[in-house]
Amino acid sequence: MKQNNNILLIEDDDSIARFVELELIHAGFEVTVKNDGVSAVETFKHDPADLVILDLMLPGLDGYGVFTLIKQQNNNIPVIMLTAKTTTREVVRGLEAGADDYIKKPFEMPELLARVQNLLRRKETPAVISYADLNIDRRRHQATRAGCMLDLTALEFDLLAYFISNHELVLSREQIYQAVWKDSYLPGTNVVDVFIRRLRKKVDEPFTEQLIKTIRGVGYSLRLK
C-alpha cells in the first residue's frame, strides 16, 4: 500500500487531535485536521481526502451531519467514526448510517493505525469478479447486478466482494468478520449482521432472486439455490 495518503481528521479535542495527527504523520500519512463540522465539510469539498477519521461529538454540526454531507460528495470515501459512546445502539447507528468502521474512545494508536491501513488497502486491491448476475470491478470500484449499478459504501463493497469470491460456500460470522474487518472476532457483537442487512437492501431487495442466504445456526452464503 502506498503511503502519503491524505487523511482528514475531524476532532474537536485539541490534545487528541494533535496526538493522532503526529502519530499518523510518523506513519507516513499526510494529515489535515479540522475541529468543527462546518469547516471540515468545506475542506473536503475543495481538497478531497483518501480517508476520513470523524469524531461524532462535534460542536455545531455533529458527526452524523458531517458524515452525510461528506458521503454526498463521495460515497466511496472510507470513514472511521470515533465515539465516546459505548452502547451497541450508538455503534449500530453509525454503521447503519454507512460508516466503514468505528473505534471507541479511549483507543490505542496501533489499533487506529491498523484500521486506517486496512481500509486504504481495500481501496487499492484490483480485481474483477462475478457470480450469477453480480459483478465487481475493484479497479473502478463499481458493483452491478443485472447491469444495474449498486450504490455501496467501501465496506459494503468489500463484503460483497468477499461473498462473491467465496460463492456457494457457507461462511460463519467469524470468518466474515476476520476476512472483511481484519480483526479478531468479538463474540456477541452483531456488526456482521448489521452490514449484511444493509447489503441485502441494495443487492437483494430490488430483485426477484435473493442471493444472500441465511444458513441457520451457521452463518451466510451467496448462492442461487
Image: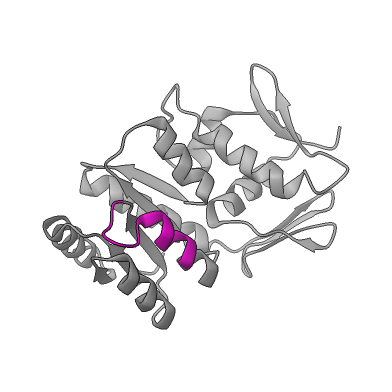
Q: Residue at x 27, y 66 (%)?
A: 36
Please report the residue visible at 63 percent of the width from the left and 38 percent of the height from the top.
197
Task: Quadrant for the C terminus, please.
Answer: top right
**Residue 21, image x, y percentages:** 20, 64
Q: Is residue 105 visible?
A: yes
Q: Can I make out residue 74 in this image?
A: no
Q: Is residue 64 magenta?
A: yes
Q: Give the left or right position of residue 215, taking residue 68 as reference.
A: right
Q: Nearer the viewer, residue 223 or 11?
A: 11
| Image: magenta residue range | 57-69
Compared with 5, 119 (above or below) is: above
Report the front residue among 12 and 182. 12
Q: Quadrant of residue 91?
A: top left
Residue 60 image offset from top left, x and y in percent: 30, 62
> Residue shown at 50%/57% (left/top)?
122
- Where is residue 65? Give x, y as percent: 42, 59
Front one among 54 and 222: 54
Q: How is the image coloured?
A: one colour
Toward which corner of the image does residue 126 lie, by quadrant?
A: bottom right
Q: Is residue 44 magenta?
A: no
